[in-house]
Image: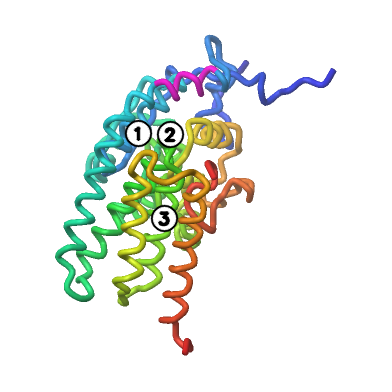
């Protein structure tokens, strides 16, 4: 009988650290709810890039979720800065860009700045979890954005749900 | 299992199949339960976003300045995010159509198209106001309005 390896996968993120950088308080709450449901306990909530920067300098992180919408080009510079020094504490952390407004130029910007993945809001709980697991299972190839094409929305927001 | 660092592995990889873990199904059920508690706040935030949009549009006498357009875009994005996450897909799609309209018009402005989008979003936000099949048609209509308006204003259009 063929085993379903996907359904057999388990994960324990209790000791993983994640930073969420999003200017929207309700969106941070939604992310917190989903991540805590998935077992994350060490969660840093950052409402702007300055707080995000302080968090990144002072805590070892496994995952960074950032919505660049409110920060514009500064958000991409921020990710480039994070990736630029290979010896820095969190240069190897997985970075997922989450944004309500996904256009082709954003995908390109994400590819160039070194993010691992772009997720279009709105996303379902399953949608976000699947992308985190995809990043966890993938080899690190920052900036190549090797996500399966069917998972990357280039034509509109929210492909995961719609 | 070795804990030795593997340079090409994601840092998150060490948490996969770790002792005491949960399955996808367990995580999804837990996460859904947690965000469900945010539904009332989400509804309030969406209502507030629509109210703010109404106030902004009420002040428009001709094409608004860039700051107003940016704020309309931001408020529309609030509805895209929260609408989709909390089961209001049509509202979310209508918000996305307005974002695209504002983007694709650039410096241009079409009051009628913006008003059509806003009025549709307000209706779609009202529980039970529009049957599901009509919601789909409404969103399709918004896409057509956006495409037509943008095409008319594109270079080379008649």
Spatial CA distance of label 3 from label 1 is 27 Å
Relative depth, front residue between B35 and A118? B35
Q: Identify the residue under disc 3.
A: B96
Q: Mark 3–mark 2 contact, CB under 8 Å? A: no
Query: For this rendering, which residue is in front, B153 or A74?
Result: B153
Which label was assigned to residue B145? none
Q: Which of marks 1 and 2 precedes in the sequence?
A: 1
Give the vertical position of A130 relative to B104 (above or below): above
Query: Is label 1 in a helix, a strand or a loop?
Result: strand
Above/below status of B3 relative to B67: above
Left/right placement of residue A87 relative to residue A143 reads: left
Residue furthest out toward the top: B20
Residue numbers of the magenta segment:
B26-33
In this rendering, which labeled residue sits more in front, label 3 or label 2? 3
Q: Chain of mark 3?
A: B
Mark 1: few/some/many CA within 10 Å (<14, 14-19, 20+): many
What residue sits 37% from the left and 73% below the top?
A: B105
Q: How many marks?
A: 3
Disc 2 to disc 1: CB gap under 8 Å: yes
Q: Position of residue A115 (x, y in %)?
A: 47, 47
Q: Do the residues indicated by labels 3 and 2 lie within the same chain of the protein?
A: no
Where in the figure is residue B79, as x and y percent of width and height? 34, 47
Q: Foreground residue, A25 or B81?
A: B81
Q: Is residue A119 magenta?
A: no
Dot 2: few (<14), some (14–19), or many (≥20) neighbours within 10 Å?
many
Circle 2 residue = A63
State which quarter of the image contains the N terminus of chain A: top right
Residue position marked by numbered label 1 in the rendering: A19
């Amino acid at each position: 009988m063929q085993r379903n390896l996907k359904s057999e996968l388990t994960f324990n993120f209790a000791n993983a650290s994640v930073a969420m950088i999003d200017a929207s308080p309700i969106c941070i709450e939604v992310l917190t709810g989903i991540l805590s449901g998935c077992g994350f306990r060490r969660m840093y909530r950052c409402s702007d890039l300055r707080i995000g920067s302080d968090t990144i300098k002072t805590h070892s992180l496994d995952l960074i979720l950032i919505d660049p919408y409110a920060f514009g080009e500064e958000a991409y510079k921020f990710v480039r800065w994070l990736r630029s020094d290979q010896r820095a504490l969190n240069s190897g952390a997985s970075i997922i860009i989450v944004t309500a407004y996904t256009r082709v130029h954003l995908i390109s910007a994400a590819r160039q700045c070194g993010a691992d993945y772009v997720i279009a809001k709105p996303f379902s709980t399953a949608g976000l979890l699947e992308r985190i697991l995809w990043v966890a299972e993938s080899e690190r190839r920052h900036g190549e954005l090797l996500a399966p094409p069917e998972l990357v929305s280039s034509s509109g927001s929210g492909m995961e749900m719609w | 299992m070795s804990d030795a660092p593997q340079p090409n592995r994601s840092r998150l990889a060490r948490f996969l199949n770790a002792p005491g873990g949960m399955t996808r199904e367990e995580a999804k059920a837990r996460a859904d339960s947690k965000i469900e508690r945010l539904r009332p706040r989400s509804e309030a935030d969406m209502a507030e976003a629509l109210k703010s949009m109404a106030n902004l549009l009420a002040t428009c006498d001709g094409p608004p300045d860039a700051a107003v357009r940016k704020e309309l875009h931001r408020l529309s994005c609030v509805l895209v995010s929260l609408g989709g996450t909390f089961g209001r897909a049509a509202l979310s799609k209508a918000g996305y159509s307005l974002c695209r309209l504002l983007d694709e018009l650039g410096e241009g402005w079409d009051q009628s198209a913006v008003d059509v989008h806003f009025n549709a979003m307000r209706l779609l936000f009202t529980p039970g106001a529009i049957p599901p099949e009509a919601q789909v048609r409404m969103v399709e209509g918004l896409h057509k309005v956006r495409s037509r308006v943008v095409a008319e204003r594109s270079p080379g259009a008649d």
